[in-house]
Amino acid sequence: MTSVLRIHGLTVDVGGLRIVDGLDLDLRKGERVALVGESGSGKSMTARALLRLDPSVSVGGSVLFQGKELIGLPEKEVRKVRGSQIAMVFQDPTTALNPLQRIGEQVAEPLRLRGVGRRSAMKQAAEMLDRLGVPRAAERLGAYPHEFSGGMKQRVMLAAALITRPKVLIADEPTTALDVRVQEQVLTLIEQLAAEEGIAVLLITHDLGIVAGFADRVAVMYAGRKVEENSVDAFFAGPSHPYGKGLLASVPRVDRALTERLDTVPGVPAKPSARPAGCAFHPRCAAAIDRCRTDAPVLLTIGTGQAACHLIEEGALRC
Amino acid sequence: MLTADGLTKRYGRFTAIEDISFTLHAGEVLGLVGESGSGKSTTVRCLVGLTKPDAGQVRYAGPKFRRGVQMVFQDPYASLNPRMTVAEIVGEGLLVHGIEKSSAGRRSRVGGLLEQVGLDKSDMDRYPRSFSGGQRQRIAIARAIAVEPKVLICDEPVSALDVSVQAQVVNVLRDMKLELGLSILFIAHDLAVVRYLCDRLVVLDGGRIAETGTREQIYANPRAPYTKSLLAAVPVPDPAAERLRRSAR
């Protein structure tokens, strides 16, 4: 399968701090990949850097979109890709939509910017909203965002993102602000549309529960680096990296017998401003050895995936 | 310990909650669950007196409501005064309620409280900004338990936290219940977290009680269709189970 998006050695620096440090990630046509991490892991900055949303942020490495290098491209050229070829939806549909602009105009805007006539753009907006399950879509083009619920607003966001038939959709915590039942509906809609149109989806999230139901592959970030990547089946059957193991174990689940206490990962997530030397996870790792405190581990191939951990290399950890 | 009796609150023509009745018993953790708009927040506001209900009343069985009922809020970045040190934040209640008048005595009490919630004594002279979300939430718990309350009301206390840290805070709350015999009203929308902590549940739907029951009954055998659909939508970190569930819809 061909890669639509090939990220290699991506670095993101903000105010002299390295937030993302050499990330590699491949997105194939129609594939759904989850980028998982806690706050400060660099997952959202990765998403924003791919689309160059923050002009003050310095982005390095390589991002190939259908073979075309995006890093170093002038803003004018980036604009041809952003939104129309690579689209994005954000966590909070309430702040992402313009409260003073009618729904129809906001959904149709990406088409209007590309020179599509108003009548045709509005017709397509109605069709897209309809596909995303907005009831009486054609009649509601004139409504304002405040007339919609959170779940309906997120559908409007998705319609605006998908109306140009992008090749890649970056969804940054798209359902975090929604109730679970609505969350499930929205994820199912993204899944269906992506499958029908062959759109590759990069889902940025901290919620392993939704990853299991949505993604084909999962990459785990910690302190700006990818520490593990695998197929969802392999990852959820047993993560390779101690952080992945700890993260999965600390998820409360309704499908397991109750235990006395929840498993936890001790300590707090590493901050980019105080990145521990060696493996950034070592202060929280119960099995850390001397090497973990000094040398940064590299990603090794393990089974169907990859993990960056000295303990695995030394055979000290069961995978 | 704390009883809501027929609480009703209307805003104009909109009924936020209607006839909400439940009792938080001594030493139990009661979960108040529901989706956004279900009336959780209005119920809590009525319970602590921030909103006056149109009908119904709140009864508290312990002494001194203002000391006996303490709260932990959702957003640990907004609930701690950034200009106060941890010692001042946690010790304030001890001073206000005249529990510990000497400053040295307060410092020693604060040190003990911090250790109780898994923080270090030496953290007490730092300001909230140097703590992560999970640590701040523990500071908020230390502040709440400092005045030896009978009831702790926790309003979505782990919703804003990272998964690995959320588990730490849930365990601290569980310890507080067991060690201090606290009665805890735990307001949450995450049914997986609620299951770990709560002995009984009150399920709210559209401002009314959909169902009340023990943890065992609600999770194994939910009666209300609303509870069933909420439980069915809780994602589980198991790809095979998720595929099965989705294909069943």
Image (cartoon, rainbow, N blue to C red):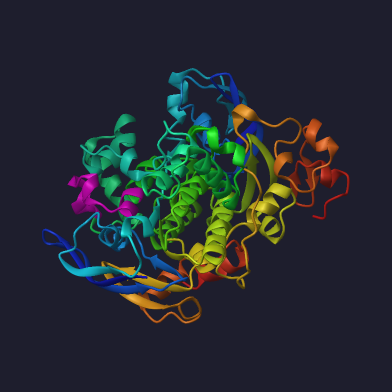
**Residue A119 point in image, percent of width and height:** 22, 40
Residue A29: name its quadrant. Answer: top right
**Residue B209 point in image, percent of width and height:** 30, 73
Q: From what the image shows, is residue B190 above or below residue A301?
A: below
Q: From what the image shows, is residue A218 above or below residue B43?
A: above
Is residue B137 within the magenta segment?
no
**Residue A304 point in image, percent of width and height:** 75, 51
Report the front residue among B159 and B47: B47
**Residue B71 point in image, percent of width and height:** 39, 54
The reply to whether residue B190 is visible in this rendering is yes
Q: Taking B19 as reference, is B176 left or right?
A: right
Q: From what the image shows, is residue A293 above or below residue B55?
A: above
Question: Magenta span covers which residues?
Answer: A137-154
Outermost front residue: B102
Report the front residue among A137 and B105: B105
Is residue A145 within the magenta segment?
yes
The reply to whether residue A67 is visible in this rendering is no
Report the front residue among A267 and A304: A267
Q: Residue at x 26, y 59 (%)?
A: B42
Report the front residue among A256 and A205: A256
